[in-house]
Amino acid sequence: MGVLKANMRIAHPLYEILPALYVLGAGALLYGSYRLHSGPLSLLLMLAGAFGAVAGVAIWLRRRDFRAAHAEYWSRAGNDSDDQPLR
């Protein structure tokens, strides 16, 4: 009843834009760090911004590589041999 499903999904448009949101958020954190000039908060913002930028770019690159590697498989999936008439 009240159990959270492990296979919950987010909307496709949100899923596709997440890496860009990570990079934009990272840019905002880095800008905030730059404006503070010094201090522990500036360092914390800089580290969080750098981590967010790396995470956003890494996710984007992994998705791109996965889609490129599996493009042939996906194109063959639509042409299933079981649907072909026997000769």
Image (cartoon, rainbow, N blue to C red):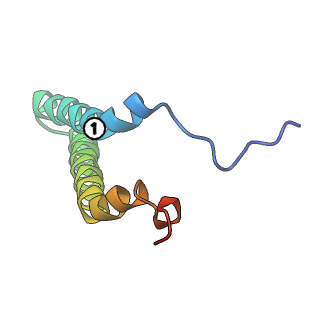
Depth check, front residue: 36 or 70: 70
Question: Vertical placement of 41 versus 80: above or below?
Answer: above
Residue 80 location, x and y as percent?
46, 61
Q: Name the residue: 12% across, 27% down.
A: 35
Q: Quadrant of residue 8?
A: top right
Q: Quadrant of residue 13?
A: top left
Furthest toward the bottom, the residue is 87
Relative placement, left or right, of 10 versus 13 is right
Depth check, front residue: 53 or 31: 53
Question: Vertical placement of 1 versus 61: above or below?
Answer: above
Q: Amino acid at mark 1?
A: Leu
Q: Quadrant of residue 23?
A: top left
Depth check, front residue: 65 or 55: 65
Residue 66 location, x and y as percent?
30, 61
Q: How many residues crowd around disc 1 within 10 Å: few (fewer than 14), some, or many (20 or more)?
A: few
Q: Name the residue: 28% across, 58% down.
A: 71
Furthest toward the right, the residue is 1
Query: What residue did someone put label 1 on?
Result: 41
Relative placement, left or right, of 35 versus 21 is left
Relative placement, left or right, of 86 versus 65 is right
Relative placement, left or right, of 16 versus 60 is right
Question: Vertical placement of 55 versus 11: above or below?
Answer: below
Q: Secondary structure at mark 1?
A: helix
How many numbered discs?
1
Residue 26 location, x and y as percent?
23, 38
In what quadrant of the picture does the N terminus appear? top right
Residue 60 location, x and y as percent?
25, 49
Q: Name the residue: 22% across, 31% down.
A: 24
